[in-house]
Every structure is written in structure tokens, then in C-alpha cells.
Amino acid sequence: MSLPEHPTGLDGLYHWEETTPNNVYMTQPHSGGQTTDYTWAEVGNEARRMASYLKSLDLPENSKIALVSKNCAHWIIADLAIWMAGHVSVPLYPTLNAETVRYILDHSDSELLFIGKLDDWGMMKDGVPADMPTISLPLCPQKNELPAECQDWYDVIEKQEPLQGQPRRGLDELATIVYTSGSTGKPKGVMINFGSICATSNLVKNLTDVGPNDRVLSYLPLAHVYERAAIEANTLRYGAHVYFAESLDTFAADLRRASPTFFHSVPRLWVKFQLAVMDKIGEEKYHRLMRIPVLRGIIKKKILKQLGLENVKIAATGSAPLPASVIEWYRGLGLELLEGYGMTENFAYSHCSMPGRSRVGFVGHAQEGVETKIAENGEILVKSPGTMMGYYKNPEKTAEDITEEGYLRTGDMGEIDDDGRLKITGRVKELFKTSKGKYVAPVPIENKLCHHPKIEVVCVAGANQPQPYAQVLLSEDALAERAKGTLDEAGLTEEFSEILDEVNATLDPHEHVQFMVVVKDNWTIENGFLTPTMKIKRNVIEEHYAPNIEAWYSARKKVIWES
């Protein structure tokens, strides 16, 4: 059989289980270094059996079924089973607290919950209604903490015959409700149909050839559209082999095992990879070796092999801006990082840099079928085949965010160059006004301040203050040194002060950053300072440090170390 012109994920499963049943689709690592391979036939068999069970429950068509788990093979198998049974999947981030879990399960009208691989089920379990049916996935480790009536995945499917035939879903049918990370207020349920998911899988074919011989590593949250589009949508369409990361501690080994041909990451991790290499080699030695022609090629290959990226054909970065210096560093290794741009509301199908046509600082060209224009206030408006059906139970917000012509109001500000490439210049809603009545866009300033190897993340603020200020999170290594008391704070104070002067020299007077505060807290996904894709939650950070602002300004120092 051949794939339809516009295939859904189910069409992809049916195609590969029929044409290449014995090819390995997914490789799942386990603690201790062991792995389990799942062929297309095995994935199809388990999905069909679970779909049979779901149909036996006699739920109404398009019922909502929730799924909470870290990335694993059975995340995708469960999603396929939900779709095959005629229902809608509702993925939950594996780091949510109980209050948010309860809100999403209630708001989405979920009928059942799959519970999978989690680090802290205890933090989440009180959010699950006592009467909600649950099924544990194979890697669910907290069996003794699960609801007493929770059924085991394999116990369920052993009693079921595989669903026969090839049940199909229409492109206009609702496939999934993706809840935003809730950086402000309650999360919104973004309704995505099968056509949107299909559209996003068009992107990779425009970049290069892709097929069953390609490999990807899944490690960013599958509950987020960036990972779901890159991993689930594309591999189901093109038959590529999916490897999963076991944990943060094993990530380097997992990456080398996969040796991906396609690799995508977020800026924070691209910077971490670079810093790890430079710490190991030494910056001075690295630049010296790269100036020697006979050694340059050897060094490049050695670094890429050590990172597990020696076979990468396409490397992508997204979700936030990446400093130009980092992009140039990777290009020096022969890896052209392609920046992309998209939103939950268009299933990440919007813009992407094209090989050989990318421009540092720009997120690339509008993809096939995408129309872009800049509104009078500078906001980017995007009409995409991936655009959502709307927000679940919120037609007012849907009407507010989608124009009558079908353009999505992105909330981002931007400009388009002569070649049609888009540049993000800030957030419409993140602009703040100083006490002098001048507006400041924080993101471009943050990108300029983030170039020091000891600086991990920057948050620029200053609403209703005379000048902006910057809150700085140190890198992991620097935080560890500070905890041990071995960090050279005096030396860093001098270096940060110089950075501040250099950056301010490039800014308009009303944008000048008055001081930098080196915070003592570590901003993480778990403590709510970062989104699941490691973007800062600006409102959370500003609210947390608000009581200190008056004292910081009164200190009249360029660099302040929070005690």
C-alpha cells in the first residue's frame, strides 16, 4: 500500500506495519543500559489491542482520553490506540502539580488517564479524581502509589483481540487537545485536528530526503508540539527510527547510541553542549587548534562524534532565540543550525530556515502554505495549514486570537527581510514602559547579555522604573562552584560589569540596563520558573523578586549578588 497524499499518523502506522513489519520503529532504553526494540508490527499489534479495549468501553465518539508520561515508546503507542479507537488524546506534561492536573482533566472532560514513566507521581496523583479509570504504561515505576483500581497495560491488552482493518480519521477531525504551559493564568486547551498534524510533517521533506534509514532522538516533552511534530508526526509519516533518552544522567550515552541523522534542540541545550566542549578543551587551546589547517578537520569530527552528532544531516533549534555566536560556533564545526519558529496554536508549522539560505538572527522562510504579514503595531500574523481549530470551551479567546481572515495573532513582534526571512524582535505583551514613559523590548537585550559562559539565562525587567535591570541565572557549573564557595565572585563582577557596558553601548539611552542581579535561586521547570521547553516564565520571575526591587535600585551597584 502507498501513503495517501495527506496522511494522518494512523495512515503512517498502517503503511509501515504492512510494508516493513519487521523494521524497528522505536528503541526504548531501561535503567542499567538495556534496551527494548519495538518493530512496526509490534507497535501495531499493541495499539490495536488497546484500541479494542477502549472501544469496548462504549464511550461516545471523540471522547477525551488523557496521557501523562515522560517520553517513551508507549506514549506514542497509547496515542495511536486513542486515535484508532475514534477518540481524542489529551497529553499532560510530566512535571505538572496536582492542581494543574486536576484542572486539565476536568476542563478537557477526560474519561480515562494513561499513567506512564514519571519522576514524581506523588506530586501529581492528588489531582486525579478518585473515580477516573486509569491504565499504567509499562515503564510506570510507582506501582504501589497508583490508584487501587489502576489496570496494567499488558494485563489489558492480553485479554483483547487486535482491532481489525484500518480505521481512519478525517483531516478535519479533532485529534488532540494540547494545553499550553500556563505561563500566565490557567492553561488553555488548543484543539488540533489531524490536518494540522499532517501539515507539520511536510516541513522535513522540504529540508532534505528522509526515510526509514533515518534516526531521531526523543527527549524534549512529547506533550509539547515542538517534540510531537518533530518526532511523532514525522516518524509516522516517513518511517524513521525513534530512540528515546532514559534520563538526564544518561543523555550523552543515549545521544551517541542513537547517532541521529536529524536532531533538534532548544537554545539552552545547544549552549550547554558548546560550554561542555569548551570546558573540556579550553577556549584558548580550541581556537589555537582550529587555526591549524591539518588539525581543523580532525578536531571538528572528534567534537561532533563526542556529542553524538557526527551523522546529523539536519540540525534544528527553536522555541527561543539562540545567540549568533553560538550559531557561528556550530557552523565552524560544519553543523548549520537551522532556526525555526512556530506555536502551539499552529502545531509548530510556520517558519524555518532553509539549508544554504539561513541568516543568523532570522527564523527563516514561511513554509509551504503559510502566509505571513506584519500588523500596524508590529505584531506577526500567520495563516498556516497547521492553525488550531480554536481553544477548547473558549470561543471568545479563539475569536480574539484568530482574525476573520484566518490569521493567528502570534503576540510576537517581527520584521521580514528582502528574501522573505522572518526576524523576531520581541513580544507585544512583553514590552514594558519605564517611569520615563519609554517602551522597552526585553528579549533583544537578554540575547545580548547571555554570551558569557557563566551566564545561563537572563530576564530583563523594569516596568515603572527609571531604567531596566537584568536578573541573571548562573550556569550549572557556576552554581555548583558558588554553593561550594569556590566561585570567583570578584572576578565575575568585573567581567559582568564590562559586559553591561558593552551591551549598553549598543542600546538606546532609555534601554540601558542599570544593573545586573545574580540570583541565588536555580530556575527550573520543576519550581515553575521555566516552561517545559525551558523558556523563562517572565511573570513568575518578576513576581518572585518584586519585594527586592527597591533595595536593588537603592544599592547603586552595577552587579549585585543576591545573598
Image: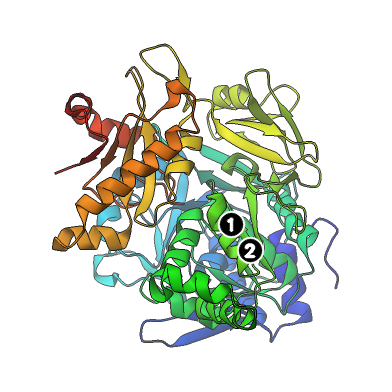
Nearer to us in this view, 102 or 196: 196
420 versus 285 height, above or below: above
Q: Is residue 120 visible?
A: no
Q: Callout 1, which amino acid?
A: Ile
Coloring scheme used: rainbow
Q: Callout 2, which amino acid?
A: Arg
Give the alpha-carbon distance from disc 1 to disc 2, as whole Å.
6 Å
- Quadrant of residue 557 in the image? top left
Image quadrant in which the N terminus is located: bottom right
> SS for tag 2?
helix
User: On the image, numbered disc 2 is attached to which residue?
Assistant: 331
- Quadrant of residue 9 in the image? bottom right
Nearer to us in this view, 147 or 125: 125
Q: Is residue 336 visible?
A: yes
> SS for tag 1?
helix
User: On the image, numbered disc 1 is attached to which residue?
Assistant: 327
Nearer to us in this view, 452 or 1: 452
Q: Is residue 488 left or right of residue 31?
A: left
- Residue 99 in the image, given as x and y percentages of width and height: 30, 43
Q: Are marks 1 and 2 in contact (CB under 8 Å)?
A: yes
- Residue 491 in the image, given as x and y percentages of width and height: 25, 53
Nearer to us in this view, 370 or 185: 370
